[in-house]
Image: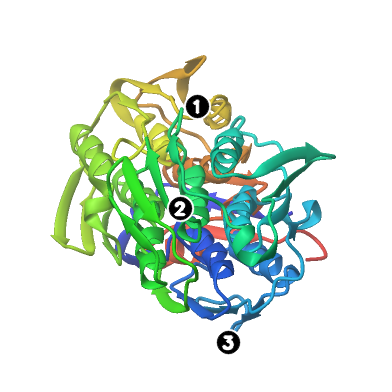
Amino acid sequence: MDKFLINGGKALRGAVAVSGAKNSALPAMAAALLTADKVVVRNVPKVRDLVTMSKLLAFMDAKVSVAAVPASDYEIQAPKLNHAEAPYELVKTMRASILTLGPLMARLGIARVSLPGGCAIGARPVDLHLKALEQMGAEIATSRGYIEAKVHGNGSQGRRLKGAHIVFERITVTGTENILMAASLAEGETVLENAAREPEVTDLIAMLRKMGAQICGDGTSTLRIRGVKELHGTEHTVIPDRIEAGTFLVAGAITGGDLKIHNCIAAHLGAVIAKLHQAGVQIDIVDATTIRVRGTEKLLGADVTTEEYPGFATDMQAQYMALATQAEGASVITETIFENRFLHASEMMRMGANISVEGRRAVVRGPAQLSGTTVQASDLRASAGLVLAGLVASGETLIDRVYHIDRGYEGIVEKLRAVGADIERVHAPGT
């Protein structure tokens, strides 16, 4: 397995461009299953999860065309879907495979999708997806690790899902996206209450609307979808990755650097920018797609609680913890979205951080002099947090299991090296 080797202590200076959002590109590619026409998805990040999604669509007999591998533009056409199945061998490394369930049920009225496997950051059950589909007329069972769903009826129109009034018990991003896609071809109107408001959801709505879907309520917790008989092809450019942008904001701040972050949407980063301001970080909104971050002589401890959008994203929690190790005073970090998402804390403590964890609450006391050592990444965002810690630590930090970060950050080593970081990828023997 590849590793990252970092020599810390270098201030990051220059400019970095943010790639497309993984969590927007994945549902966009899944949405291509809703039509027999050609769909082009642009600004796709060159990361492992998107390659896996393309293989999954191809398994279902969709034609997936790219100009190069890895690709930033995907051309997808699914005139016929001969496999309404997402097999375990293809999806075991990517939980977002569940996003094919809604389109398959909408288009074919039948689906067999492997249950997502375990996750280091805690359970992310799909029960809300299944309950909503049942309200729309689906019969669902689980057998041998698979979700088996079908709509009864004769003929294509007889197998259509039916609109329903759905109230999610908890906010679920992928659940909202799945039901949005399913409802787009359902018979009648679907009302989704307590829907997720993340920018990635709004981006999917924009794409579906270009395909002919009738959806209103963007950016609110109540969405109304009037089903249509068919959708058509489109071209769609996914939004920039707000989590990658937030990670670079912290990178500039924690190293005392001066970074301009291009190709981001400042409006999507409101909670992160506000919290960094509270911690004493200098941030300027240059324009709608550029943010400048400058280091300060003294970072200040500030408490943070993760929340659904527009609150502080759980996917920025590990990065903020790294920053808090360098801040004066105590920072209390409360994780409300996922249980067991403090696995990176013990690795930072091995580097010299003063962190105490009790349940979903971590107290970080700083500033701490971090020292480089060998650490192990447990998930995608934990990887990013450890990279940030390594950038400010003295000596060498060796990060193992970086395949996690490869799932969601395009060219992270190259981007950091371009702005002054001393980081390299160490390939495992034989790779």
Looking at marks 1 and 2 on the same chain, the residue that comes earlier in the sequence is marked by 2
Give the residue type at disc 1. Answer: Gly
Give the residue type at disc 2. Answer: Leu
Looking at marks 3 and 1 on the same chain, the residue that comes earlier in the sequence is marked by 3
Given contact means CB atoms under 8 Å apart, are the residues at marks 3 and 1 in contact?
Answer: no
In this rendered view, identify the residue nearer to me: 87 or 274.
Answer: 87
Q: Quadrant of the N terminus?
A: bottom right
Q: Quadrant of residue 406?
A: bottom right
Check disc 2 and report the residue beneath it.
180
Query: On the rendered structure, is 94 left or right of 212?
Result: right
Residue drawn at (56%, 46%) of the image: 380
* Neighbourhood count class around disc 3 (C-alpha, 10 Å): few under 14, some 14–19, many 20 upward: few
Check disc 1 and report the residue beneath it.
352
Q: Quadrant of residue 285?
A: bottom left
Check disc 3 and report the residue beneath it.
67
Where residue 41 appears, as percent x and y from the top left, is 48, 74
Find the distance from the CA under tag 1 to the CA under tag 2: 46 Å
Find the distance from the CA under tag 2 to the CA under tag 3: 30 Å
Is residue 14 in view from this perspective?
A: yes
Mark 2 or 3: in front is 2
Query: On the rendered structure, is 228 left or right of 283?
Result: right
Residue 141: numbered disc: none
* Neighbourhood count class around disc 2 (C-alpha, 10 Å): few under 14, some 14–19, many 20 upward: many
Looking at marks 2 and 3 on the same chain, the residue that comes earlier in the sequence is marked by 3
In this rendered view, identify the residue nearer to me: 341 or 206.
Answer: 206
Mark 3 or 1: in front is 3
As drawn, 426 above or below 152: below
Give the residue type at disc 3. Answer: Ala
Where residue 367 appears, as percent x and y from the top left, is 34, 26
